[in-house]
Image: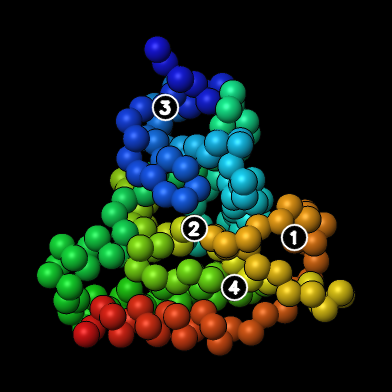
Amino acid sequence: MEHIVGGKFKLGRKIGSGSFGELYLAVNVQNGEEVAAKLESVKTKHPQLLYESKLYMLLQGGTGIPHLKWFGVETEYNVMVIDLLGPSLEDLFNYCTRKFSLKTVLMLADQLINRVEYMHSRGFLHRDIKPDNFLMGLGRKANQACSIYLLHLFVHYRDLQHTNTYHIGKTRILQEQLDMQVLTLTLELSKAGGMISNHWVMCLCTS
């Protein structure tokens, strides 16, 4: 039995799982494009996919941000469809016996810093910077300058008008924290946290 989500994405084999639910390989039946589909039970206590999809929408157009293709509810699942990406930086690091050349590290550093700086320029601070959350592009995306993509948007932001700090991450998530009106306010964040985390990634790669 074929499972179609969003009217055109046919689910295939499961390729991953996590706290959010399960990740499936899917195919756009209209053009044959392979994509990734995240499925999360609508009964989950602290849903994440709706919030993550809103963040992707706000960050669309940025270099290294996966394209959000569809989000909606199908039967008992929240479903988010995004670009299908390749191995993570952690996967490649292990494949290279946990040692990158200085040239490779410098090339990676330029892209990693650019990805984090883009999020900061939009008022968001990624709260889970690590090699597992940087993925390589596939196909044509692998040959482009933006071959590294930033995933899993667990973020921290501040509503300056109300001097409130909000956290959107693996822990407690409240729907009102992610109301679209709050997300579109003018935000100001310190870059220190992201730069420290990025420095940790670079130290890990050269150690």
Q: Verify CB contact (< 8 Å) between mark 1 and mark 2.
A: no
Taking the image as shown, residue 64 lies to the left or right of residue 204, namely right
Say which mark, if any, is on residue 152: 2
Give the quarter of the image for residue 79. top right
List x then y, in percent, for residue 96.
Answer: 14, 68
Q: CA distance from mark 2 to mark 4?
A: 12 Å
Q: Upstream in the sequence, badge 1 or badge 2? A: 2
- Local SS, label 2: loop
Q: Verify CB contact (< 8 Å) between mark 2 and mark 4.
A: no
The type of residue carrying mark 4 is Leu
* Residue depicted at x 41% and y 27%: 11
- Local SS, label 4: strand
List x then y, in percent, for residue 33.
Answer: 40, 32
**Residue beneath disc 1:** 177
Of badges 1 and 3, the one in the foreground is: 1
Q: Upstream in the sequence, badge 1 or badge 3? A: 3
Say which mark, if any, is on residue 104: none
**Residue beneath disc 3:** 11
Q: Upstream in the sequence, badge 2 or badge 4? A: 4
**Residue beneath disc 4:** 125
Q: Residue furthest right?
A: 161
Q: Is residue 54 above or below residue 194?
A: above
Q: Residue furthest left?
A: 97
Q: CA distance from mark 1 to mark 4?
A: 15 Å
Q: CA distance from mark 3 to mark 4?
A: 32 Å
* Residue depicted at x 49% and y 84%: 195
Q: Upstream in the sequence, badge 3 or badge 4? A: 3
Q: Upstream in the sequence, badge 1 or badge 4? A: 4
